[in-house]
Amino acid sequence: MGLLPAATLVVLGAGSLAVAAGAAPTQTPRRTHARVTLLAEHTALDAAGRPTMLGLDFQMADGWHIYWRNPGASGTPPTVTWHGEGLTFGPIEWPVPTRIDTEGVTSYGYAHDVLLLVPVHRTGTGPAPTRAAIAGTVDYVTCSDVCVKETASVSLTQPVRAGAAARSAEAARFAETRTRLPKTAPAAWSASAVNGDNEFTLSVRTGRPEQAATFFPFQEGLIDEAAVERLEPQPHGLVLHLRKSPYFNHHPPASLDGVLVLADRQAYTIAARLGSSGPHDHHAQGERP
Amino acid sequence: MKPVFLTALLAAGVAGLGTTPMRADTPKVGQPAPAFSAVDDHGTTRSLADYAGKFVVLEWHNQGCPYVQKHYNSGNMQRLQREWTAKGVVWLTIISSAPGTQGYVTPAQSQAYTNEEHASPTAVLLDPSGTVGHLYDARNTPQMFVIDPKGTLIYDGAIDNRPTPNPASLEGATNYVDLALGEALAGKPVTTPVTVPYGCTVKYGR
């Protein structure tokens, strides 16, 4: 039910001069639980090296999910090995994940579908080729009540041209996904955190009272993902109490880094300098004019 | 303690997200390891107390989990079992999968798997009720615990520092069980007593 044959793994980005690569016809068909497709936001790569965006489009079978960069209490985020002569690929840009609760264990990931964005630009010297072949090997773990390790080979070929290229047929997916990427926190905000006995207390000053907040840390093993986050709205921001992970190793990082999701799913990347408990008074900080 | 805390949360009008499971207090490294008894796949009851005076390793196991398969298909887990039991360490493989969930095995299936994999734990404990798993708050497979001869928990966490099911990740990995047992058997303190376990969730059932 909802299973997809592996033969559909290699799907080509529309709007490109696409050539299948890596679809091994001799491969024994097997069942997979996610279909991975490589999409491109534009119809060509810029010969001069202006970056454009690729997207790994994961379509999960019903009940299956993949993982965020910090997978939480189980799982592993997808990784990709890129091949493209004269091309440089940036790190994955991760949309805000959702909490996935299984039998008292909470992981961070994506159900249904997600587009993971990957910037690419030409760095090759010498005359630009007319076309560039892009291939990726995607290793990922997908889980429902059980987990499966899968590998997908994805590829597409794009023309290389001077100047800005037209948007591809999938450009709307990229635009929609960008609305789900965390934004850089405004410069006027301030964030700090206190390393208490049993919890981290995260204080963020946003300039307005915040009535909803959830925090996804980048680092594993800091907070107990399954615990309720206790929010104290402040006149000019928020205080969020985050229970420590049972695996917190008493070597705290310099700052609590992650994604803060506020009301209306507005998400921001924050880095909250982490101090020990004592002189800090988060209430006072929250009230400061 | 916990009920009071929860009541306070409710009174404060919490913006709760997800669920807060009621967990037993996690066993803490440096404190006595929780006592337990369980029946192994040969029908013998094994208690932690039976092994007083010895180092004991607990290995949470699910043969269907790709993270466990990384360590068995490569022979990495069998190597650990062989090397450390040869040095007098007791190795208990524990299966907490509930009936009907991945990794649940009958005693006969467990014995067959152990033979096929050339595994050599001291015993394989069948914990289909999840009692021992919950006692240790075992979260993942594989998750590893090390207990010293005085019954003190001296390691809790991952098997190594590569949280992926990719077999290529084994090369150059730091194996935390080797590290902890190597230090402890040499009479040294364990330098990395707690790490973040990785893998599948333990299939306790609903």
Image (tube, rainbow, N blue to C red):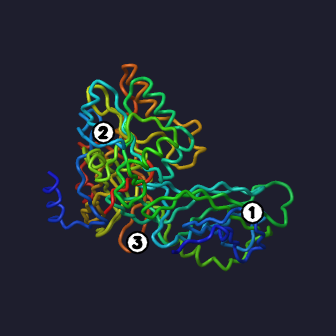
Q: Which residue is mark 3?
A: A265
Front in this rendered view, residue B177 or B19 = B177
Residue B59 locus on image (x, y percent)? 39, 41
Looking at the rendered image, the quarter that the C terminus of chain A falls into is: bottom left
Give the CA separation, mark 2 to mark 3: 54 Å
Q: Residues within 10 Å of mark 3 (few under 14, many from 20)?
A: some
The residue type indicated by label 2 comes to: Thr
Give the CA separation, mark 2 to mark 1: 49 Å
Judge left or right: residue A206 versus residue B131: right
Q: Residues within 10 Å of mark 1 (few under 14, many from 20)?
A: few
SS at mark 3 in the image: helix
Q: Which mark is residue A26?
A: 1
Disc 2 is attached to a residue of which chain?
A: B
Name the quadrant containing residue A259. bottom left
Give the CA separation, mark 1 to mark 3: 45 Å
Task: Point out the tag, 1 or 3, that comes first from the N-terminus.
Answer: 1
